[in-house]
Amino acid sequence: MRIPGFLTAAAVTLLAACSQQGPGESAPATSGTAAGAASSGKPVVGLALSTQNNPFFVELKDGAQKAANDAGVNLLVVDAQDDPARQISSVEDLIQRRVSVILLNPTDSSALAGAVQSAQRANIPVVTLDRGVDGVDVASHIASDNVAGGKMAADYLAKALGGKGNIIELQGVAGTSAARERGKGFDDAIAGTGMKIVASQPANFDRAQGLSVSENLLQAHGDVQAIFAQNDEMALGAVQALAGKNKKVLVVGFDGTPDGKTAVQNGTMAATVAQQPEEIGRLGVETAKKLIDKQPVEKSIAVPLKLLTKE
Amino acid sequence: MTLHFDRSRAITLLQRLGSVIGLVLLFVVLSIMSPDFLTTDNLLTVLRQVSINALIAFGMTFVILAGGIDLSVGAILALTGAVTAGLMAAGHGMLLSAGAGLALGLLLGIVNGALVSWGRVAPFIATLGTMTLLRGLTLSYTQGSPIPVTNSGFALIGGGYVAHLIPLPVIWMFAAFLVCGFLLRGTVFGRHVVAIGGNEEAARLSGVRISPMKLAIYGLSGLLSACAGIVLTSRLYSAQATAGAGYELDAIAAVVLGGTSLSGGRGWLFGTLVGALLIGFLNNGLNLLGVSSFYQQVVKGIVILIAVLLDRRQ
């Protein structure tokens, strides 16, 4: 048969000509950073969101949109629906659209390095929001100070429980910087007290999984005084798991979503470490504007958190 | 000379051309509306974006042509990608790891085929079951976290270029298209696929061995899903536990947009390629135009509905 022979020959030829460099990447980049001006004359900033199926990121987008209106910047929003492959595609689309800056809210920390490099090769600076990207150097990283937030939750529990007790920890999506940092801040602060983390399991930032994981862990560990969830959705799942059980367990969440705040008001959750997503979005656009105007920006911007309790 | 006018053939032709006309129309409109659309760089970028869906959709075309459906393709993609990355992380070579991933994809596809043929389970339910099962296996294998890839040779499969211009995934896509096109048009296997989809009982009576055919058809779909899984893992520098969620629907949409009938027996592979390109260019164009992602889904839904309505006209 002749076809396979032909294909093999073609494949060998192609492999010989293979490289990791794409079109134009070997030549010095030609288009200037802010040269990708839109037809309206306003600079365009791309915002690549991980998902809009979570109120947190919708608030982040709203904050960015407001700031963009004030700063006279066109904001182009693309949404990855939590699929890293889709996010790479939409970042590529933003590069093709020749936006001036890309604000990237990665779906996860490990998969987007290639997309960030492509943008940088096209001379488009990248600012990461909320989550970082491993293995690349970005113009700026804007996120809540998650380590400090984890410590806040631990300090609150130390005070409320008088420095001793057993704790269950519900972890977020493994591999995300948010999960890692919140866990680190919390675990390190707990280590210095008489309190003990008896179980620590991922429930992937998801309410339904927060419910089932809590149910299982409560079954396995009878003597528990507190549950720390690395976000409010999982904390609300834990609240469901405790409903109907005659047990006094303090639930502390993270994020300060509208549902989380309501639960703190109702007393079903003891506290939540509130993030300010609108502020992350606003600072993102402000940083982008500085990059367009060729002003220096900070490498890492920590957005403050605050502990919300019923009082 | 008498003029033969075969009405059903004319409609089929029109329908087939419909997807091509749709693609050309979309192309023209996007070129006019966005100055960034019609550049070599952008077109190649879209081809690369499309390649993963196209690879899956080629396999899906055989399954749908034979009157079946395969919902497990996204899950096969995730598991084969994870196993390939896992083997490399354990220190095995790239060829062995990728080969194991491909073999696993083929095997899982054959399991689907066995459930459908010997188990006499409806394809929808059989592959829904394996999809759920494989998703669970992937999550437990990866423990829910991504498996990073450090092998720079492996990163070329999805991220490399030929002659500094053409992305390698585009080459894989066209190579798979040629091979699958030959299988469908140039071999007995292809004719039997269409025969089974047209009328399984008639095909059986005329000597087509149904069960082995189904093992092969679903096996091919699994193999191509594994190819897509390896390309995706390479592109992402990591295997993601939840990779490929919803890809089965994108692949089915590409097949249907391309004019292949969901009831089987009628369709063509070129249409599937066109369907995949339609979806890809639609995504890209709407992003370039700055259309909200919410409306993007509305637009895609409408395009798919129009294609299916055209199919019902037959």
Image (cartoon, coloured by chain):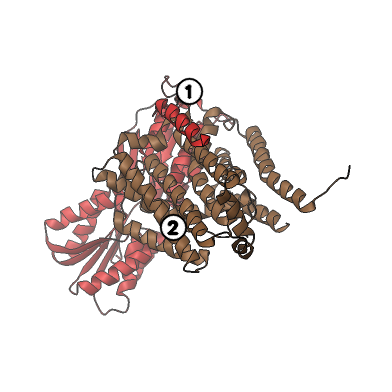
Q: Amino acid at mark 1?
A: Ser
Can you give x and y, in whole percent of width and height, for residue B184 in the image? 58, 47
Q: Which residue is mark 2?
A: B110
Nearer-the-camera pick, A280 or A207: A207
Nearer-the-camera pick, B235 or B14: B14
Classify residue B48 as left or right of residue B15: left
Question: Residue drawn at (62%, 47%), measured in percent from left and top?
Answer: B268
Nearer-the-camera pick, B160 or A141: B160
Question: Residue drawn at (34%, 52%), measured in percent from left and top?
Answer: A275
What chain does mark 1 sit on? A
Chain A painted colour: red
Mark 2 and 1 residues: CB-CB less than 8 Å, in contact? no
Of the 4 image quadrants, the one containing the N terminus of chain B is top right
Q: Pointer 1: residues within 10 angstroms few (<14), some, or many (20+)? A: few
Give the structural element (helix, strand or loop) at label 2. helix
Can you give x and y, in whole percent of width and height, for residue A51 in the image? 44, 51
Can you give x and y, in whole percent of width and height, for residue A22 in the image? 44, 28
Nearer-the-camera pick, B287 or A143: B287
Question: Residue drawn at (48%, 33%), measured in percent from left and top?
Answer: A5
Can you give x and y, in whole percent of width and height, for residue A188 in the image? 16, 53
The picture quadrant where one finds residue A308 is bottom left
Give the structural element (helix, strand or loop) at label 1. loop
Q: Is residue B239 visible?
A: no
Question: Residue drawn at (44%, 45%), measured in percent from left and top?
Answer: B228
Q: Is residue B193 visible?
A: yes
> Which chain, by letter, is brown?
B
Q: Which residue is mark 1?
A: A31
State whether residue A131 is above or below residue B262: above
CA separation in Å, label 2 and label 1: 51 Å
Label number found at residue A279:
none
Q: Pointer 2: residues within 10 angstroms few (<14), some, or many (20+)? A: many
